[in-house]
Image (cartoon, grey):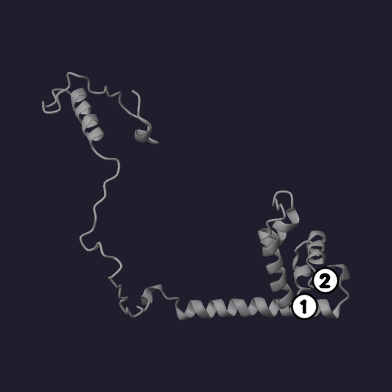
Amino acid sequence: MQHEPEEQTFQLQALEIREPDSNFDPLKPPESGEEYLMHMFYERKQCPAVVTKRSPKIRNNTGSTTIEMLDNPELPPFKCLLPTPEWQDEQVKSFQAARSQVLVLRRELANNNYDQSAEPPLTSDHEKWQEFCRNQQPLLSTLLHLSQNDLEQLLEKLSKWLQDPNSTVDLLHDVWLARWLYA
């Protein structure tokens, strides 16, 4: 059975349905399942593809109507959806523990001799930062050398490198960039 282009769908037809021929009478009740399917096929062809109905609330003179915004007060969230005080306290404790661990590690790095090659560039030059990221793995020891300001600048640079229309970034080949984004 051939379909017209506008009738094609993504679903496959389950049954073979013959198109109504010249002997087909749509007013005559179907006598078999096959005739019933032909009636359905005929009725389907009579229906428009898209049916629209204009809302009676919409007026034709849209230029003179004004829309007033209702002042709806913001509803408070359901109490069952809010985090419990215990959960909030646990999150704060977890964050404070992680922050203090980072501070301890940074102090140890400052007190001991550490690898100077992991020092970030002391400039805002994009090329030097890109070279730094290409040559250094985003290990914790490397990230601890970066101040909060340097980390924020690095994130902005990574974002710009991805959005730059002139560069052809391929995360499969530019593994260094994927590693730094993941870190």
**Foreground residue among 67 and 85:** 67
* Label 1 sits on residue: 106
Rendered residue at 54%/77% (across/down)? 90
User: Image check: 132 left or right of 10?
Assistant: right
* Label 2 sits on residue: 121
The quadrant of the image that shows the N terminus is top left
**Looking at the picture, which amino acid does disc 2 mark?**
Pro
How many numbered markers are drawn?
2
**Foreground residue among 119 and 163:** 163
User: Image check: 42 left or right of 159?
Assistant: left
Q: Position of residue 101 (x, y in %)?
A: 70, 77
**Label 1 crowd (10 A; few <14 / some 14-19 / many >=20):** some
User: Image check: 8 left or right of 24?
Assistant: right
Q: Which quarter of the picture shows residue 79?
A: bottom left
Mark 2 lies on a secondary structure that is loop
Q: Position of residue 94 (x, y in %)?
A: 60, 76
**Looking at the picture, which amino acid does disc 1 mark?**
Arg
Rendered residue at 36%/79% (across/down)? 74
User: Image check: 42 left or right of 28?
Assistant: right
The quadrant of the image that shows the C terminus is bottom right
Task: Please identify the residue farthest to the left as the structure is shown.
Answer: 28
**Foreground residue among 71 and 174:** 71
Q: Which quarter of the picture shows residue 92?
A: bottom right
